[in-house]
Image (tube, rainbow, N blue to C red):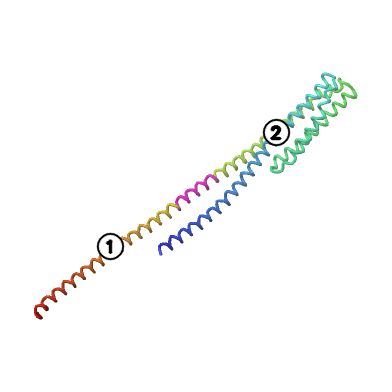
Amino acid sequence: MANKKISLLILAAFVVGMLMLIYVHFIFSKNNDQLISGNQKLMEEVTVSSQLKDLEKYVISMESIVKGTIVTNDAGYFKGLEKNVEATQTNLNKLQKITDDDSSARYIDELDTLVQHKLLYDKNVLEVFRAKGKDAAEKMFASHSSSRLTDSIVTLIHKIDNTRKKHFAQAMLTIEKSSKKAQLFISLLILSVLAGGAMLFWYIINIIRKQGLLIRQLHISEKKVRESAHIKENFMANMSHEIRTPMNAILG
């Protein structure tokens, strides 16, 4: 009976352990998905930050190219302009894919408008330079419209970058929470296994101890029975001897 109880207890512990493992696996998978999602979000934010910095660099570089062309009266500066324009447009197209935040999307739309105005203005300045020469282009450039556009673009880029930093911080917080949850469930699993193992071990030891006690009691009982039987045999033998002795005397 005791062996049957032990077997049932071990089976129950195995079933409970398997259910716990399945549950922990589910939680781990969920946390793992959150970690992967958080890491992807971090990579996206790093990419966006890099794109914003590149865009700022290209816009400032275009300003320098136009200014250098006018000041030096050297059309050789044009060589790097087309490359910067293409890179700027490529970065804008990538930034336009951001749709996870309304304020970021709105700022990027404004940024796109300002950059297009900037590209058009610089193009017009260079066309004036080609058609009318340095003085006319210098006069147009001196209106400060180009520099104001550049400053507005840089300011807006910084606004977008600050907005994205909040998303970066949120992604970091998500990763931290997921990591803490994973550590907590690992600790709970270890404690549960240790507690369950300790309880099972104590139960088995307790049953073994009781069985040992019953066996000792049984041995004692058997010994008493044997002693009683031996005493009874001796008594019967003595009684038989005492009865036979007078009978022999009478018959003799």
User: What secondary structure is marked by label 2?
Assistant: helix
Q: Are marks 1 and 2 in contact (CB under 8 Å)?
A: no
Q: Quadrant of residue 57?
A: top right
Give the residue at the far top of this rendering: 72
Looking at the rendered structure, the kind of residue marked 1 is Ile
Would you say the magenta stretch is mainly helix, strand or loop? helix
Q: Earlier in the sequence, mark 1 or mark 2?
A: 2
Q: Is residue 221 above or below residue 166?
A: below
* Label 1 vs label 2, nearer the camera: 1
- Residue toward you, 53 or 194: 194
Q: Quadrant of residue 128?
A: top right
> Callout 1 environment at 10 Å: few (<14), some (14 to 19), or many (20+)?
few
Residue 78 forms part of the magenta stretch: no
- Residue at image location 83% in from the left, 22% down from the top: 69
Looking at the rendered structure, the kind of residue marked 2 is Ser
- Part of the protein shown in magenta: 182-196
Q: Quadrant of the N terminus?
A: bottom left
- Residue at image location 75% in from the left, 38% down from the top: 94
Give the residue at the far bottom of this rendering: 251
Return the residue at label 1: 220
- Residue at image location 59% in from the left, 42% down from the top: 175
User: What secondary structure is marked by label 1?
Assistant: helix
Give the residue at the far right of this rendering: 131
Instruction: Give left or right: position of 232 versus 97.
Output: left
Tell me the number on the disc at residue 50: 2
